[in-house]
Structure formats: C-alpha cells, structure tokens
Image (cartoon, rainbow, N blue to C red):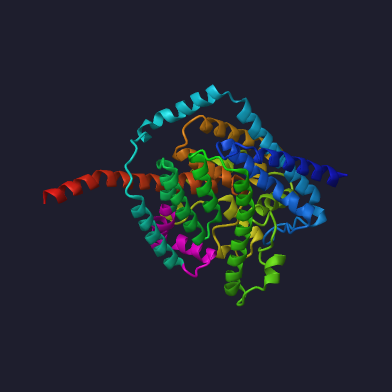
Amino acid sequence: MLHAIYYSLVGATLLLLVIWFLRSDWGIRSQFDLFVITWAYYALCVPVDLFLGLSAEGPFLLPDLNEARYFHTVVEVTIYYYTLAIGYVLAYALLPHATAADTRAFLAAPFWWTKVPIVRLPPLWLIMTLLCLVMAVYIGSYDGIDRGARAAMLRGDPSARLGNILTLRLTIAAVIVLIVLLNDRKQARWVVVGGVAVSLLSGGRTVAVFILVAYLMRHDVVISRQTRVLLVVGGFLFAMFLKAAYVYVASVFILGQPLSPLDLLTGRIDAGISFSGLEGIGGYAWPVYFLEKGDSPLWLGWSYVEIAARNTLPDFITGTGVPTLSMQFSPEVQPNSRLDPSGRAFSAIAEAWLNFGSIGPLLVGILFGIAAKILDTGPRGLFFILFAGMSMRLFRSDFASAYNSYIVVTGAMACLTYVLFLLWQHVTPRLRLERQQS
C-alpha cells in the first residue's frame, strides 16, 4: 500500500512538472523557475530509479537505496524534499512584491558604492583568446592529475593555489561577468560556448550548466518546446557519457587497467547509468545515512552561521580552510578520504535535519523562498546570478561549501575581473593618445 501511494505521488508530481515545462512561454526567468527545476531533479531522481529498477547505490559506504530495508527511510527523505518545497513556495508566494522590493532596496542601500558605471569591454575576440591561453596553462599544469591529488596539491602548495585562482577560477568568473555585462545576445552566446568548453575540459559539469543557466536568466530567454526536450535528453546522455569516460580513464590509474563496457553499465566504481547517478544520489544517501544512525544532534544553525562565516576567507589564501560538513563526514563513508580532502557531495536535506530536526527542511525552504522573492524584484546583476549558482547546488552541497564557492570565491574573482576591465577602459585611450602623439 505504501509503495502504491508513494509512487502515485511521485507520478502525479512528474505529470504536473511536465505540464509546467511544456508551456509555450517557458523559460528559466526567475529564481523561482530555477528552484523548481533543481528541486524536481534532486527530489524525484531516486524515486524514479527505484521504480524503474535502476541503480540507486550510494558511493563508498553510503547506503544502497535499492535495498528494501531502506525504503521507509527513503520515503521519509522524499517527504522532507516536499516539505522544503512547500516552505519555499509559501514564502515566495505570500511575501508581497512591494515588501520584497523594499527589503531589497534596504539591503542594497549600504552598498551604494557597488553601483559602478558600465564598463567598455575589450574586443571579445581578444578576451576569448586570452581565456583560451589561460586555460591551456591550467590544463597543462594539471594534466594527468586526478581530483584527489589535485585537491591535496592545492591545499599544500601556495604556488599551486595561486595558479588555480589565476587560471580556472578567474576564467569562470570572467565568463559570468561577461554574460552579465554583454547586452548583445549573440556575443553572449559565444561567451557561453567558450565557458562551457572550459568547464567540461576541467571536469566541471555543474559549472557548465551554471554558465548556461546564467545566460538564460540574464537575457530572459524563452526556449521552444523542441529545444527544451533536446536539451534535457541530450544533456543527460552527454553528461552520463562524460562521467563514464572519466571513470574509464581514471580506472587506468586506480585499477591499473581500463574497465570493460559492462563494468561501466553495471555501475562499478560509481559509473552506473541512472538518473540519480548523474548528480543526485548524495542528496538522498546522506539523509538516509544520518536518519538510520539515530536522532538529530540539533545544532540550531551552527553549520549555517559559524562554518559559513569561517569560510568567508577563501582556502586558496589560507591554505588550511575550515572543514565543511562534507569534509567532516567523508572519513566515515570514504576510507581513503585523506587522499581526497575536498570531501564528498553533501545534502541540503541532511544539513537542515542535523541543525533543526524534522522541521529543518521547512525552515530552509522558507528562508530560501524569501531570498528568492527579494532577488526576483530587482535587476539580474552579478549577485542575482551568483545566488542562482547557490540554488543550483543547494541539494547536493552543504551551505558553507556553496557559499564559499559561489559568493566568496566566484564573487571575488568576478570583482577582480571587473577591475581589470575598468583598467582597460582607462588605460587604452591614454596609450592610443601617446601613440598618436609619437
């Protein structure tokens, strides 16, 4: 009986989402639209896998959700996902537009100095050429180094951290800044193509999607139905292909020999073909892991406040960093986590439960819904886009990691990029004048 009710709820939700997705004027035009898409994937990927008999096995020592003994806990986690969504939707819908706009104006008032004039950009071909050269240096520096060894290198070598910030992080930030500043859609699309290529070459599937979403939101793009379907289906298949290809190459270093196609299809070394295997398995496996262990420790917001505040100073500067929840709990489920100090992808549902128990997801949904409504009343500037990145990563990360990655690091590099563009704007006329005088 529980199975029938559970899968009926999931099926009804999928039907409503398909109807919403196939609207003629559909587009990712607000923080709310982005939340719905993100929630839909992370909340429903595991239930769909279980219904279809696909792999829903958590990585390393996290629970294998295909086991029947975990089904009731999986249902509980799904309820938490729905609870978070209810909190988000209610907060977004009930907060008056005028109140949200006044709140945004009040919060932005102390930052009047950020209202800098629109900068005159260098030629786009020059910018893209420089970014390609920078990424060539990055790829050449880390060629053949796996993720764990790369993370260890960045934490132990100041010169490696500096190289990372001046190559990959600065390149991604420059792409985001260009998307925000460029009013010409055609030019912005070329920037997106280059940014997505850079992200995929560096192993960043999520960043590639973020760049595409940033373009869609900034330019208020309406996508045709056929294009939407092609993007969803083609994007999923391409992402799974990249994942399988990465594991295939990594197996040479891990096992000493490449995996067979059968190993890739059946899920050996976290490469199984499934919906949750794309990015969403951790969003379920972590909450199930903690729920099976016992009661919530009721941290009452500790991880949202203290860990996030202590991560405001980027670890590529300090070299030590403050361990996020992912880093703290990875040793429990990943025996070789010391070789990969970056940790495992975490879960917003798990963090909310660890802080506030069963009411946690509802509270987090309300807070994010309020923030989204406030941002949706204003212009689609840099912070609007950075918050969208946090929202995309909400369900597969702890708050401090998402905050550090998008607000602190990407935000700081975006400001640096803008300063460089301002310098170009002021220096080039003088150089041109000196050349004419000489």
Q: Which residues are magenta?
A: 143-171
Q: Residue at x 33, y 40 (%)?
A: 119
For the residue pair 192 and 264, the one nearer the viewer reads as 192
Q: Residue at x 59, y 25 (%)?
A: 95
For the N terminus, the quadrant is top right
Residue 307 appears in view: no
Left or right of 142 on screen, residue 367 = right
Q: Please identify the residue farthest to the bottom as the structure is shown.
A: 256
Left or right of 5 on screen, residue 185 = left
Q: Position of residue 393 (x, y in %)?
A: 57, 47
Q: Please identify the residue farthest to the right as the structure is shown.
A: 1
Residue 35 appears in view: yes
For the residue pair 234 and 281, the one nearer the viewer reads as 234
Q: Position of residue 433 (x, y in %)?
A: 16, 46
Q: Residue at x 24, y 47 (%)?
A: 428
Quadrant of the rendered image containing residue 135? bottom left
In terms of secondary structure, what is the magenta stretch mainly? Answer: helix
Q: Residue at x 60, y 59 (%)?
A: 238
The verdict on residue 41 being magenta is: no
Q: Position of residue 49 (x, y in %)?
A: 74, 54
Left or right of 407 on screen, residue 258 = right
The verdict on residue 167 being magenta is: yes
Left or right of 199 on screen, residue 49 = right
Quadrant of the rendered image containing residue 80? top right
For the residue pair 355 and 18, the one nearer the viewer reads as 18
Q: Position of residue 224 (x, y in %)?
A: 59, 43
